[in-house]
């Protein structure tokens, strides 16, 4: 913001009334370093746009996505299709069928994700919410990891690969070592964090030292991670002796697994406590530590950060290591928490869903936690929803959420919200008037 | 053509950018519109040029009311505008630039540049512009590009010409040429509206001056009004234009105190393309001295300061602070060694706009006590620091927790200056310390810079504004194409400095200046003569 006369939003970038001080920099920008290409700038702009959106936009994106899901549920429902055949004769039938289809589907989603009021035992009734939290655990951990990277202006798309590597390290320590009870699970979890940290650290070092774009590198590392685990599961070290299946030996649940928080059949494990702990730790890291100050500074304005003596290269590497470590812990939630074996599909699609979780949570720790719980609920509820409609509806709903939070202006125009640019600008204008008084 | 604006009002949201502005420009008059950044000058001219629709008021040309739907209408009515940032396509020739938007077509819709070429030659000859119609725009010096813009406006029969901050990018000699051109145009009957915040130019060129403050006309005056009176009108209170510097505090004969504390030797820097941008530069600044680096924008000053800070590595040379070599150290180590740095581009390098004022005030101190112990930061200490500095540097804001983007440019710059001066310094490098800052804040910042000098700190100022150089410097180094053309005392003649800024060596510059005085230089000499009792 400058002290020049503010202009209406309809005249963006009219150079005529650019502030007198904003003369273009001449002779290139030596401070920019080699990695500030056009892709780089666009990545940062996208991140800044998405992360600066308001909570309201996040919330409305979810509402819109559920509405769009409702339309698809109705269209795909056979009763609705039948009733629509004689719509002009008896329109009420169609509307009733639509209501029934949508209600049944979303009721199933609720019963699968929160509380099953039709269950025959109290245990079964409350099991859904614990399932939601179980699914949410790796999403929260990986989401926090990606959020840290996003805050530093790094678009880490490699959650998937980092989760896989975390799972590989955690599982190997889990099933191969023979250690006492607390030590074993601690070492396995730390190993998982290390695995993820190494995988993301590769992208961080490459970016800092050579300027390689982290988006491309992390996507490629996802593929390498996927085939690496497939290969490892063919080796002696990772296979059950004598078995032809690409599945690792069982991880001893007494020593190396995260303890269950409730008795079976509940699957909720101590990994969820780890996720709560991690949320607090990430908050402290970003908002209360010097490292977080550096991460936020490098993310918001790398030029000013460099000028202030912050080594942006160091921040890039450090951020990726922290980000990968959290994703690695998400992998540990899988192998040490729920699966207790290592398979090729150990990461499911958590690494990609975590991107949405972090973006929906605006890369703030608490927001990411809540978004993780929401996505856990969609996953848990989706299972029961299948009986009413296609499972793909859940995927569509998730995708629409991604679409909408990536385009806040779209959500704003649907709900006729004011542009966020309008408010600070006017405030700035008012401040200027006061100040020059 | 007579131009009259009556009661022009333009608001953006709650901000009144123009408040019932009346302005009359007579035929063949050079009318200066004087005001600080953000006073509403550009808004008013954009209303006149049809870019904005006024909320109230009317525009009259030769006493006939007109309504412009867009710049096209304004151009058709005879209004031409030369923007501060030229609207030229770099790879076009002058003739092509002229044809752009009004392409004359010949048979079968083929572009006919002959007509455009002829117009360029005609106008250029008539006013002595010396512009070749086939020259490519990007090869022309800045002053010539500006003349291309003027030719464009004139070729569309402009009878009122608006010049928006036309001298911001010119050397004193180019400014002088522009002044000659303006006088030629004036005698040909063209009215000129000349937007500026530079008092000296107003007095040298304008027939009438209208001063705008906070969107309203606060006064109209003739050019005989003194600079001090103009400044007071612009700011709305008494302004001290020149800082009372006093003599050098240190005795240069005293070996220790007057020693060269900050020494740059044989510094050569290449840009990423391998071009030499800083060329074997030698500079030395004594303790308690302000050395100003003068020069037109883009002659290596940016790279020089960035190399001093450590953002760029030089290929040869050394930078010594109190005898310690800085090259090879990181930016953080240099800042720790007591180097203060005010970057040239505040919004890009000086502040992080989404960070709070308090955070920006510790941007290069965040990891030092009392703001942090180990890796844990102390928000209380950051807040306390902000409260103290906001009071000490008179930073006008709502709350230190607000993002710094809510502050005016002048107050943002105060944040940068406050941050750098709040720690013990052994040298201060400040680039364009008052760019885009209102007159009132300029005075304040100059005082602080001089106070820092009086503390015994060697201060290096980089400025493209000669007025600032004269206000602050004890000695002046002039840079041209990466080289230091010469280091001269601060009382060197304005014309000599201007010629040196165009690359003329000192001795030759003295000879040339003696034979040809520029208008502004003359005005200076007259003013000096009058000032002496």
Image: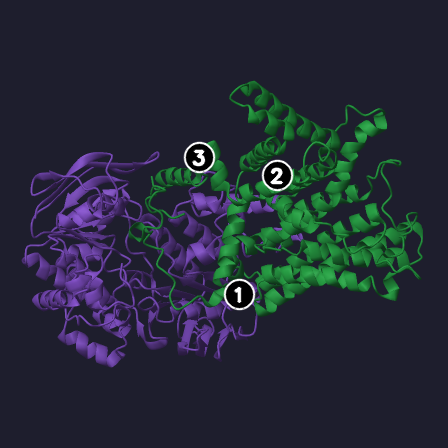
Tell me if mark 2 has few (under 14), some (14-19) or many (20+) residues whose alpha carbon lies within 10 angstroms of its own.
many
Residue B134 is situated, as x and y percent measured from the top left of the image, at: 20, 72
Same chain, labels 1 and 3: yes
Q: Residue sitting at 25 percent across and 34 percent down?
A: B55
Same chain, labels 2 and 3: yes
Q: Which residue matches tag 1?
A: A35
State the CA–CA distance, disc 1 to disc 3.
35 Å
Q: Chain of mark 3?
A: A
Please identify, in this view, whether the residue under mark 2 or under mark 3 is nearer the observer.
2
| Colour basis | by chain
Q: Chain of mark 1?
A: A
Q: Which residue matches tag 2?
A: A397
Residue B413 is situated, as x and y percent measured from the top left of the image, at: 42, 52
A234 left or right of B94 in image: right
| Residue B525 shows up from this direction | no
Residue B107 is situated, as x and y percent measured from the top left of the image, at: 15, 64
Sequence-first tag of 2 and 1:
1
Q: Nearer the viewer, residue B288 or A191?
A: A191
B138 w.r.t. A114: above or below: below
What is chain A's hue in the picture? Answer: green
Q: Which residue matches tag 3?
A: A418
Sequence-first tag of 1 and 3:
1
What is chain B's hue in the picture? Answer: purple
State the CA–CA distance, disc 2 to disc 3.
25 Å
Q: Secondary structure at mark 1?
A: loop
Please identify, in this view, whether the residue under mark 2 or under mark 1 is nearer the observer.
2
């Amino acid at each position: 913001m400058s002290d020049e006369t503010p202009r209406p939003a309809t005249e963006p970038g009219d150079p005529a009334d650019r502030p007198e001080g904003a003369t273009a920099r001449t002779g290139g920008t030596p401070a920019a370093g080699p990695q500030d290409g056009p892709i780089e700038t666009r990545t940062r702009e996208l991140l800044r746009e998405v992360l600066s959106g308001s909570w309201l936009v996040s919330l409305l994106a979810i509402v819109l996505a559920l509405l769009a899901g409702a339309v698809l549920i109705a269209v795909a429902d056979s009763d609705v299709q039948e009733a629509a055949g004689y719509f002009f004769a008896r329109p009420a039938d169609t509307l009733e069928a639509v209501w029934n289809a949508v209600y049944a589907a979303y009721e199933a989603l609720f019963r699968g994700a929160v509380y099953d009021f039709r269950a025959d035992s109290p245990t079964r009734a409350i099991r859904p919410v614990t399932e939601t939290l179980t699914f949410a655990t790796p999403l929260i951990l990986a989401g926090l990891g990606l959020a840290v990277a996003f805050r530093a202006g790094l678009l880490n798309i490699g959650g998937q690969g980092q989760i896989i590597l975390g799972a590989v390290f955690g599982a190997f320590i889990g099933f191969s070592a023979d250690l006492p009870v607390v030590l074993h699970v601690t070492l396995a979890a730390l190993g998982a964090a290390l695995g993820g940290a190494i995988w993301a650290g590769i992208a961080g070092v490459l970016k800092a030292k050579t300027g390689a774009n982290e988006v491309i590198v992390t996507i490629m590392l996802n593929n390498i991670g996927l085939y690496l685990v497939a290969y490892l599961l063919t080796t002696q070290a990772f296979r059950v002796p004598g078995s032809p299946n690409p599945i690792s030996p069982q991880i001893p649940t007494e020593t190396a697994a995260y303890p269950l928080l409730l008795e079976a059949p509940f699957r909720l494990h101590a990994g969820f406590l780890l996720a709560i702990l991690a949320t607090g730790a990430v908050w402290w890291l970003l908002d209360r530590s010097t490292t977080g100050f550096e991460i936020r500074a490098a993310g918001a304005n790398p030029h000013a950060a460099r000028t202030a003596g912050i080594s942006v290269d160091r921040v890039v590497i450090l951020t990726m290591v922290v980000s990968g470590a959290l994703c690695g812990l998400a992998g540990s939630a899988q192998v040490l928490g729920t699966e207790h074996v290592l398979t090729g599909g150990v990461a499911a699609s958590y690494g990609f869903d975590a991107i949405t979780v972090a973006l929906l949570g605006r890369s703030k720790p608490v927001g990411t936690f809540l978004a993780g719980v929401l996505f856990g609920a969609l996953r848990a509820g989706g299972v029961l929803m299948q009986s009413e409609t296609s499972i793909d509806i859940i995927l569509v709903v998730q995708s629409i959420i991604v679409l909408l939070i990536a385009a806040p202006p779209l959500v704003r125009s649907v709900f006729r919200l004011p542009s966020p640019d309008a408010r600070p600008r006017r405030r700035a204008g008012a401040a200027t008037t006061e100040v020059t008084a | 053509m007579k131009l009259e604006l009556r009661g022009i009002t333009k608001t953006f949201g709650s901000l009144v950018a123009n408040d019932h502005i009346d302005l009359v420009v007579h035929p063949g008059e050079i009318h200066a519109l004087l005001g600080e950044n953000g006073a509403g000058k550009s808004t008013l001219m954009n209303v006149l040029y049809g870019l904005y629709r006024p909320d109230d008021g009317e525009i009259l040309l030769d006493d006939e009311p007109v309504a412009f739907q867009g710049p096209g209408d304004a151009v058709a009515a005879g209004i031409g505008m030369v923007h501060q940032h030229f609207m030229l396509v770099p790879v076009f020739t002058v003739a092509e630039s002229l044809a752009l938007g009004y392409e004359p077509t010949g048979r079968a819709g083929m572009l006919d540049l002959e007509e455009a070429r002829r117009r360029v030659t005609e106008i250029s000859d008539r006013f002595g512009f010396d512009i070749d119609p086939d020259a490519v725009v990007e090869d022309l010096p800045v002053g010539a590009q500006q003349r291309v813009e003027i030719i464009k406006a004139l070729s569309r029969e402009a009878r009122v010409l608006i010049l928006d901050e036309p001298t911001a990018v010119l050397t004193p000699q180019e400014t002088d040429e522009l002044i000659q051109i303006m006088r030629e145009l004036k005698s040909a009957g063209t009215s000129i509206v000349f937007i500026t915040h530079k008092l000296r130019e107003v007095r040298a060129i304008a027939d009438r001056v209208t001063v705008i403050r906070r969107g309203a006309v606060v006064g109209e005056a003739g050019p005989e009004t003194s600079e001090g009176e103009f400044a007071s009108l612009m700011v709305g209170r008494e302004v001290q234009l020149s800082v009372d510097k006093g003599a050098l505090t240190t005795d240069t004969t005293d070996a220790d105190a007057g020693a060269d504390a900050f020494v740059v030797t044989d510094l050569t820097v290449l840009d990423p393309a391998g071009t030499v941008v800083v060329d074997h530069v030698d500079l030395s600044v004594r303790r308690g001295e302000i050395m100003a680096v003068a020069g037109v924008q883009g002659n290596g000053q940016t790279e020089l300061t960035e190399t001093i800070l450590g953002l760029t590595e030089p290929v040869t040379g050394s930078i010594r602070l109190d005898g310690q070599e800085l090259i090879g150290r990181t930016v953080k180590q240099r800042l720790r060694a007591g180097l203060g740095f005010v970057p040239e581009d505040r919004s890009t390098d000086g502040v992080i706009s989404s960070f709070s004022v308090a955070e920006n005030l510790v941007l290069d101190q965040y990891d030092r006590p009392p703001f942090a112990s180990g890796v844990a930061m102390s928000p209380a200490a950051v807040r306390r620091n902000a409260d103290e500095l906001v009071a000490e540097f008179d930073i006008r804001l709502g709350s230190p927790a607000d993002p710094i983007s809510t502050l005016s440019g002048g107050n943002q710059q105060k944040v940068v200056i406050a941050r750098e001066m709040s720690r013990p310094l052994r040298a201060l490098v400040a680039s364009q310390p008052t760019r885009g800052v209102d007159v009132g804040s300029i005075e304040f910042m100059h005082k602080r810079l001089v106070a820092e000098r009086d503390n015994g700190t060697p201060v290096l100022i980089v400025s493209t504004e000669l007025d600032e150089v004269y206000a602050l410097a004890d000695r002046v180094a002039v840079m041209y194409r990466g080289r230091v053309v010469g280091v001269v005392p601060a009382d060197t003649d304005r014309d000599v400095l201007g010629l040196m800024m165009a690359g003329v060596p000192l001795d030759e510059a003295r000879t040339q200046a003696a034979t040809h005085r520029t208008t502004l230089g003359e005005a200076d000499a007259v003013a000096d003569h009058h000032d002496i009792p």
